[in-house]
Image (spheres, helix red, strand yellow):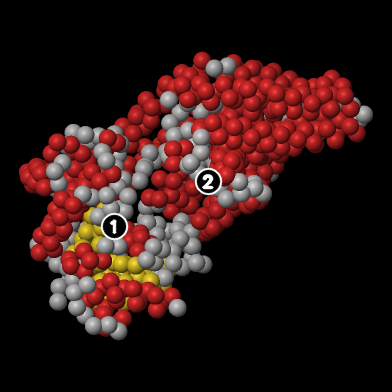
Amino acid sequence: MSGADRSLESLWLKRSREFRKEVTPYFGYMAQSGFPLFVSLIVLSSAFGYIKLIRDLPSDFPITLVGTIALFLILSWSPLRSWLTMPDLVFHMPREAEMKSYLRRAFRRSAMMTSLLGLVVLLLYWPIYRQGDGEAGFGILLLFAAVIRAANLLGAWQERKLAWSSVRLLLRLLRWAANALALAVLLTSEPWQAALFLLLLIALFAVLYRLPDKHTFPWERLIEEESRTRRSYYLFFGLFIDVPTLPSRTASRAYLAWILRYIPNRHRLTYVYLYAGSLVRTEIGGIVLRLVVLFALILYWFAEDGWLSGWGAAAAYIVLLQLVAVQLGGLRHAHRYSVWRHVYPLPDAERASSLLIVDRWAMAAVALLTWLPAAIMLLLQGLVIPAVFALLAAYAQILFVRPGRLRRKLVEDAEEE
Amino acid sequence: MSEPILQVAGLTGGYSPRRPVLHDVTFEVRAGEMVGLIGLNGAGKSTTIKHVLGLMKQHQGLVKVDGVTLEENAERYRSAFAYVPETPVLFDELTVEEHLRLTGMAYNVAEREFGERQEQLLDEFQMKAKRTAFASHLSKGMKQKVMIMNALLSEPPLYMIDEPFLGLDPLGIRSLLERLVEVKKRGSAILMSSHILSTVEAYCDRFIILHQGRVAAYGTLEEVCQAAGIEARGGALEDAFYKLVTEGSQ
């Protein structure tokens, strides 16, 4: 390895160390919150459920489907930490030819981390697989998983180099589908058949990746990927402590943006318009949307179960709503340091009350949407009281408790500034 | 006639293969000349520069720097130019001096030359007092100066400079222009995009007028004026530009 190569490799290591140093304090704050306890509770209860499951596996348990889904997710996921930022375009682009040595460490890190995760999933799956009709031994499964892992790392790199986003997305989808297919074949057929099939798939992709236009080094893609990963970290830490605001990603979300047109064109609604726009278009809106879908599904299952005569679903509804409320609370940081606060001919008090209006409407919509599927299920079973009680409790909180809390937080923020 | 350092031939490109932003763009920048790239906002100036940087893939056509395409010889292609982006991009964790050192390393500038050039640039751009300042503590104009100093430090055959005057103080603008004239005399090629037409006219030897992704006119002031159908004289670039872009969009 030449001196120049070594200097780029050590630059990667330096940046990796700096990132660790940067995020360590946030892990401290996270540890101080109830989060680790929450996670250990989930781990403990899942471990308990898992042991019970492998002791007496139901005869109709979908062994292949579960194995395919678990392994396909973990083996397809191929992240890469490049630590690259915009200034690298100017300062390191002249050394593009040597950047392979810079990324060597990134690949090693990604390979080690994802392989380890893959191994854990495989070890967890193995006792289930053994109880089915599968013919492969553990060694064979491990070998296949390793080959699929390596092929995915290489494939994901080829996809990063592709010039056109549409082709890249298509090939990524194809790669994920091929993984699922290869794993399903592995878990149901004889190893030699699976090996043949896997080789064919690898050969097919080797050809597919050659066809489209490619960059020699995907600078912009890596910079974008890195900033996305960083944002996810800070979004997570933001749940526990104030974090530096990174430039947020925006999505147009036409299916929600129509709401903005219905906000009347009035002077006093200026900040309502701004906050509603921020909610609809930024990451907070995206998270809230995903949570609504997920929670609506979970609550539907709870209600279908009729657990504790419907009170189980009602209690879960209130708890899950708090999680959405925490996320939505992040909106108060949206224009905290914005210049518009000082530019607009509006009193700052207007900002707080506008935020409360947007928050109230958003919470009311979320509460209704997550309630509806579960409520229909409960009402069909004649469990009217828990369904009605849950909704009333949620709206009482949204209308009478939450505004006061949010207002206090805004005052605290203002004092901190 | 001197060698073209940058050759762009029949370039059609953009982010999506279905929606090209540039259409059949052809021009070259030769050693020892400064070429002004001008156009309205959205005309395709930055897209052209991104294609030359190799950040975007052309749908058709050819881009050569120092006689090679990026695919043929990435090392030669990359080390043949320095780039000053429209918005300064610096590492927050590095000082002014450390940025210069990084550039020196990237372009293989020998230690002694590096020392001399660094001192001269710090002096010329009035940045001596800020040599140990972190980039995050600099004003926008100073950041722009650091970008320019870095480009000048590497002394490459080609400079690509995107809107260099934004945020620069009058002394900074003067130092930049003086240095550009100097590097040009020494044989470097410069492609500069700017909206300040009077400066572009005074300093550039030839002009590329981009309009809606196409070359509306290309050549010396006389040639551009001829394309616009007006008489060449001092200050004519602005009139020619106005005529070409308003007539082009009708």
Judged left or right of residue A218, residue A117 is: right
Judged left or right of residue A155, residue A182 is: right
Residue A364: image quadrant is top right
- In the picture shown, does residue A294 fall above or below A165? above
Relative depth, front residue between B1 and B36? B36
Q: For mark 1, give the secondary structure.
A: loop
Q: How far separated are the C-alphas under marks 2 and 1?
A: 27 Å
Residue A133 position in % (x across, y down): 73, 36
Q: Which mark is residue A250?
A: 2
Q: Residue B163 carries which label?
A: 1
Residue B12: image quadrant is bottom left
- Give the chain letter at badge 1: B
Residue visible at 23% across and 50% down in the picture: B168
Relative depth, front residue between A96 and A110? A96
| Residue B86 in view (yes/no) | yes
Residue A19 position in % (x across, y down): 38, 30
Residue visible at 14% across and 36% down in the picture: B129
Residue visible at 44% across and 67% down in the picture: B21
Judged left or right of residue A414, residue A285 is: right
| Label 1 environment density (alpha carbons within 10 Å; few <14, some 14–19, many ≥20) | some
Name the mark nearer the viewer: 2 or 1. Answer: 1
